[in-house]
Amino acid sequence: MTLVLLGALCVRAQAQEPPSQDAAAKDASVNESKGMPPRATSGDYQARTQAGTLTLAAEFMRHSVPTPEATYSTEDFVIVEAGLFGPPQARLTLGIGDFSLRINGKKMASPSQPYGLLFSSLKDPEWEPPSKPKSDKPTLDAGGGKPDDSFHPIVRMPIELKRTMQQRVQRASMPEGDRALPAAGLLFFEYRGKPESIRSLELIYTGPAGKATLALQP
């Protein structure tokens, strides 16, 4: 009897054992920010400049959010795709706090924002809500009078599609921490205006590699 009870307790303890650190690390690495694949050379970006011994290259993407799998959009942020290039075997500690964007010559530049703030306004231009089924019976208004055509149900993107979209943007965002160069990724800057109202743009880098200001084409 004692042996049976001990065996049952061991099985229960194994079932409740939390996942190992290796398993947790593996799950976390699936969605971590890995950045965009760097372009072949810094000259393949819209503009480039030197930051110490490194080259900062970037391109203004307006309200588009490009990822290797698909291109999304947001009305609350503008996006810059940036890449850092260096000599062979070069490494650099990256952080989104190293970047800011000066729009239309404003004294205060807009700091780069975490990718998570983008999610509430993120849209997939390719996604279309399912078509509304046709009903043979007209919908009457509350008073029982003529049909009410003003009612339009809110259709939201399925959670699975939304999660996939968010994970892709997360992986494409600028990676952080110690990284081998070249490294590239998306930077997000809060801006709700129309891109047509932007007259000048300057991407500002202040980080371990030094300081640099890169003029971009709006």
Image (cartoon, rainbow, N blue to C red):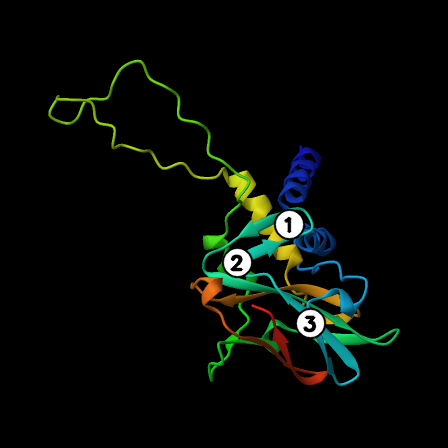
Three-letter amino acid code at disc 1? Pro
Question: In which quadrant of the rendered view does residue 94 lie?
Answer: bottom right
User: In the image shown, does 195 or 90 lie closer to the viewer?
Assistant: 195
Query: What is the number of the mark on residue 149?
Result: none
Q: Is residue 41 left or right of 155 when viewed as pictured? A: right
Residue depth check, mark 1 versus mark 3: number of the one nearer the observer: 3
Where's residue 88, x and y in %? 88, 74
Residue at left offset 65%, top offset 41%: 15
> Which numbered marker is on residue 47?
3
Query: Relative to residue 149, is residue 100 drawn left or right?
Result: right
Q: Quadrant of the C terminus?
A: bottom right
- Does residue 163 lie above or below 195 as drawn? above
Q: Secondary structure at mark 2?
A: loop
Q: Which mark is residue 18?
A: 1
Q: Counting residues from the N terminus, which is met first, the one under dot 1 or under dot 2? A: 1
Rounded to the nearest angstrom, the CA distance separating label 1 from label 2 is: 42 Å
Mark 3 residue element: strand
Q: Is residue 71 above or below residue 11?
A: below
Disc 1 versus disc 3: distance between alpha carbons?
49 Å
* Circle 2 residue: 63
> Which quadrant of the figure contains the N terminus?
top right
Disc 1 element: loop
- Looking at marks 2 and 3 on the same chain, the residue that comes earlier in the sequence is marked by 3
In the image, what residue occupies the spot 11% across and 25% down? 143
| Residue occupying image coordinates x 67% and y 46% | 69
Residue drawn at the location 68% of the way across and 65% of the way down: 175
Identify the amino acid type marked 2.
His
What's the amino acid at mark 3?
Ala
